[in-house]
Amino acid sequence: MLQRLHSLLAHTDLEVSAHQAEQLVALVGLLDKWNKAYNLTSVRDPDAMLVRHIMDSLVVSPYLEGTRFIDVGTGPGLPGLPLAIINPDKQFVLLDSLGKRIRFIRTVVHQLGLTNVQAVQSRVEAFQPEQKFDGVLSRAFASLDDMLSWCAHLPAPHGRFLALKGQIPEQELQSLPAHLTCQAVYPLHVPEQEGDRHLVVISQASQ
């Protein structure tokens, strides 16, 4: 599995240390183990998890600006856990309303010794952080409209919304609220992943 991960990473510009690679493989192992009992993801095959969950999360890393991030509707910690593993200098809050997902994330954090992840069980609308975020991440969480509405209280004034999407949500981008602007849409290359992947970056219009 480690060799397989390295072969996938070779198709990207990502810098991943040997220790981080071992942590990523351990994450797949834990996800596979827990998935049998708790049904955390519809992806059953560990090799497919490596591509569709781990690599699909890691390719966002070059676009993280700042040090404090929240992953809303994180599910089993995606993209938050893989990003936290390869960005130990950044802090991540992983938010989900389902207890079994948060228990899984806390188990991963404990077993992998991650010190930059906080798992929070809450609905996003109800979560009131003391400190706002540089980036609000979502992957397969909701429509762009819903994300921007439900998470409006989370970014700092300079903070950005980072939405992982398949195809570019053209229609939603044309109907953004006046105070927000689409800063960029980046095509994401996920090795061996079929279909389009894009990162949509939304920021305050005044920037």
Image (cartoon, grey):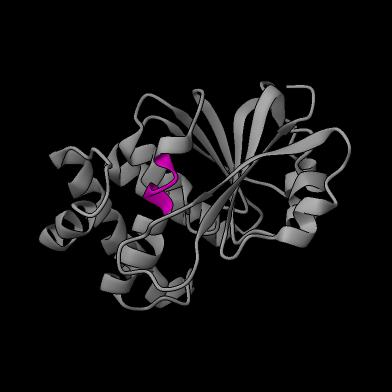
Total numbered badges shown on the rendered structure: 0
Identify the main secondary structure in magenta: helix
Residue 94, visible in the rendered structure: yes
Q: Residue at x 16, y 63 (%)?
A: 4
Residue 123 sits above or below residue 8 on the image = above
Residue 33 sits above or below residue 187 on the image = below
Residue 63 sits above or below residue 22 on the image = above
For the residue pair 48 and 106, the one nearer the viewer reads as 48
User: Residue 194 lies in what quarter of the image?
Assistant: bottom left
Q: Is residue 74 left or right of residue 154?
A: left
The residue lying furthest to the right in this view is 178
For the residue pair 100 and 8, the one nearer the viewer reads as 8
User: Residue 125 lies in what quarter of the image?
Assistant: top right
Q: Residue at x 60, y 62 (%)?
A: 140
The image quadrant where one finds the C terminus is: top right
The image quadrant where one finds the N terminus is: bottom left
Q: Position of residue 133 (x, y in %)?
A: 63, 27
User: Residue 189 lies in what quarter of the image?
Assistant: bottom left
Region in magenta: 57-61
Q: Residue at x 37, y 69 (%)?
A: 193
Residue 146, visible in the rendered structure: no
Q: Position of residue 109 (x, y in %)?
A: 37, 43
For the residue pair 183 and 92, the one nearer the viewer reads as 183
Q: Is residue 187 left or right of residue 151?
A: left
Q: Is residue 49 left or right of residue 2?
A: right
